C-alpha cells in the first residue's frame, strides 16, 4: 500500500474530517479503512490499479460525473496533470464539499499544496509517512480564473500531429527511443500486429503508414487516457483498442509485435515490468513472427530474449537507445508465465 494512500486517510482516522455518506476517489486505490464507508466510487485510469480496486469490492466509473460531498485525490506525477486534477476535483464537488489530496514529499507535495492554496484560499494539512495530506472546502470563494487555467491543462494538446493528454507517457514530446524505432521500421511487415504498451498510438500509426500489407493492429495499453488519445489519433479502420494489463498476457497471435516496453512503476525503475512484456510478446508471436523493440541501452533485455528462445539482433544502437529485433523460429518454446 502506498504511503500517500495511508496519509490520505489520516484526516478521517484522526477525526479532522467526518467520513461522509458518499465519496468519489480520483486515482482510486483500495484501503481496508474504506470498507467501513457507506459508499465510495473510484475512478482509476491505470488498468492494474482499476482491477485491484474492483477486486477489493469497490464501485468504479470510467468517467466521473455528478457532484459529491467529498472528493479524495491521489494525483499522478506531472505538474499539468495534478493541476488539472485539482480543477476536475473542484468541479465534481458539491457546494460545501471537501477535497482531500495526498502526495509524497518527493513528488512535490508542499509545492502542490501551495498551488491549491492559491485557488482555494484556506487549506488544512498534515504530514506523515514522508507525505502530506491537505484539504480544502468548496466554499464559493475559489479563484475561478485559476481554475479555468488548470482545466485547460487537462485538455489533450497537440504533440507532433498527435493529440496527447497531460499525465500519460511522453505527454509533451515524441519519445526519442520510439522515434528511433520508427526511423528503422522494416517496410515488409504483414499480417496481424500487436503494439504492447501502445501509449497514444505513435508506433502503431507508423506501422500502419509504412506497411500496407499489415491487416490489423491491436493496441494494448494500461492507461485509459493514453488509449483514448490513441483512438482519436488513429480512428477505427484496422485498429483495435484494448485497455489491458499486458503483464497478464494478451489474447491472440501476431505476425509482428512492436513495443517500447515500460520500465517504471510509479517513480521507481522496474526491470521486471519490461521483462514481463518480453515474455508476453514471445508467447503471443506466431512461429516466424517478429518482435521489434526499442529500449534504453542499459536495460538487460538480451539475456531474456535468449532465455525465451528468440533469435535476436541489435540493428541500431546510439548513446541512449538500442533496437532489438527478434524472431520466433520453428521449435522455439516459450511460456510467459515461466
Ligand atoms: C515507454 S511507453 C511507450 C508508449 C508508446 N508505445 C510510445 O512509443 O510512445 C510504455 C507504455 O506502456 C504502458 N504500460 C505500462 N504498464 C503497462 C501494463 N502493465 N500493461 C499495458 N501497458 C502498460 C504505459 O502507460 C506507456 O504508455
Image: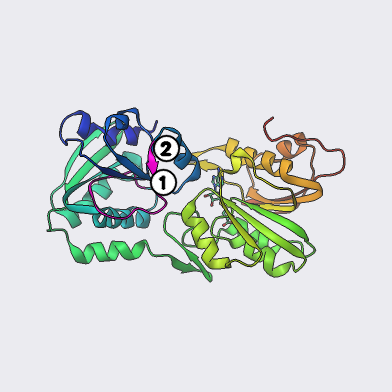
Quadrant of the image containing the N terminus: top left
Position in image of residue 66 (x %, y %): 28, 55
The tag on residue 44 is: 1
Q: Earlier in the sequence, mark 1 or mark 2?
A: 1
Hey, which quadrant is residue 188 in on the image? bottom right
Viewer-side residue, 248 vs 101: 248
Q: Quadrant of residue 248?
A: top right
Quadrant of the rendering where the C terminus is positioned: top right
Going by the picture, which residue comes out furthest to the bottom?
161
State which region is magenta: 58-75
Q: Is residue 208 left or right of residue 142?
A: right
Vertical arrangement, residue 219 with respect to residue 303, above or below: below
Q: Residues within 10 Å of mark 1 (few under 14, many from 20)?
A: many
Please say whether residue 69 is one of the residues in the magenta stretch: yes
Q: Is residue 157 visible?
A: yes
Separation of disc 1 and disc 2 at Cα? 8 Å
- Mark 2, residues whose alpha carbon is within 10 Å: few (<14), some, or many (≥20)? many
Q: Is residue 162 left or right of residue 310?
A: left
Residue shown at 27%/43% (left/top)? 23
Residue 53 badge = 2
Q: Are marks 1 and 2 in contact (CB under 8 Å)?
A: yes
Q: Against 75, is 216 above or below?
A: below
Query: Is 274 a magenta residue?
Result: no
Residue drawn at the location 71% of the way across and 36% of the way down? 304
Amino acid at each position: 500500500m502506498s504511503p500517500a494512500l495511508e496519509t490520505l486517510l489520516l484526516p478521517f482516522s484522526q477525526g479532522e474530517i467526518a467520513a461522509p455518506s458518499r465519496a468519489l476517489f480520483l486515482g482510486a486505490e483500495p484501503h481496508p479503512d474504506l470498507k467501513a464507508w457507506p459508499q465510495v466510487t473510484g475512478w482509476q485510469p491505470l488498468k492494474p490499479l482499476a482491477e485491484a480496486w474492483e477486486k477489493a469490492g469497490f464501485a468504479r466509473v470510467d468517467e466521473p460525473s455528478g457532484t459529491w460531498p467529498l472528493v479524495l485525490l491521489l494525483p499522478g506525477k506531472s505538474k499539468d496533470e495534478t493541476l488539472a486534477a485539482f480543477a476536475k476535483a473542484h468541479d465534481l464537488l458539491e457546494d460545501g464539499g471537501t477535497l482531500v489530496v495526498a502526495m509524497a514529499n518527493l513528488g512535490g507535495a508542499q509545492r502542490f499544496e501551495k498551488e491549491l492554496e492559491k485557488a482555494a484560499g484556506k487549506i488544512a494539512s498534515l504530514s506523515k509517512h514522508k507525505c502530506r495530506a491537505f484539504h480544502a472546502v468548496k466554499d464559493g470563494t475559489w479563484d475561478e480564473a485559476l481554475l479555468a487555467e488548470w482545466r485547460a491543462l487537462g485538455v489533450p494538446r497537440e504533440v507532433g500531429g498527435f493529440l496527447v493528454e497531460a499525465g500519460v507517457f511522453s505527454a509533451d514530446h515524441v519519445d526519442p527511443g520510439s522515434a528511433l524505432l520508427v526511423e528503422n521500421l522494416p517496410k515488409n511487415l504483414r499480417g496481424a500486429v500487436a503494439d504492447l504498451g501502445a501509449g497514444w498510438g505513435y508506433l502503431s500509426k507508423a506501422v500502419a503508414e509504412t506497411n500496407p500489407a499489415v491487416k490489423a493492429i491491436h493496441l494494448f495499453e494500461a492507461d485509459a487516457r493514453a488509449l483514448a488519445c490513441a483512438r482519436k489519433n488513429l480512428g477505427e479502420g484496422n485498429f483495435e483498442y484494448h485497455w489491458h494489463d499486458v503483464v497478464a498476457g494478451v489474447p491472440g497471435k501476431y505476425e509482428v509485435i512492436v513495443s517500447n516496453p515500460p520500465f517504471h512503476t510509479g517513480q521507481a525503475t522496474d526491470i521486471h515490468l519490461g521483462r514481463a512484456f518480453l515474455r508476453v510478446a514471445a508467447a503471443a508471436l506466431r512461429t516466424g513472427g517478429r518482435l521489434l523493440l526499442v529500449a534504453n541501452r542499459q536495460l538487460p533485455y538480451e539475456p531474456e530474449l535468449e532465455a525465451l528462445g528468440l533469435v535476436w539482433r541489435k540493428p541500431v544502437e546510439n548513446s541512449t537507445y538500442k533496437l532489438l529485433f527478434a524472431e520466433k523460429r520453428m521449435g522455439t518454446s516459450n511460456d510467459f508465465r515461466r
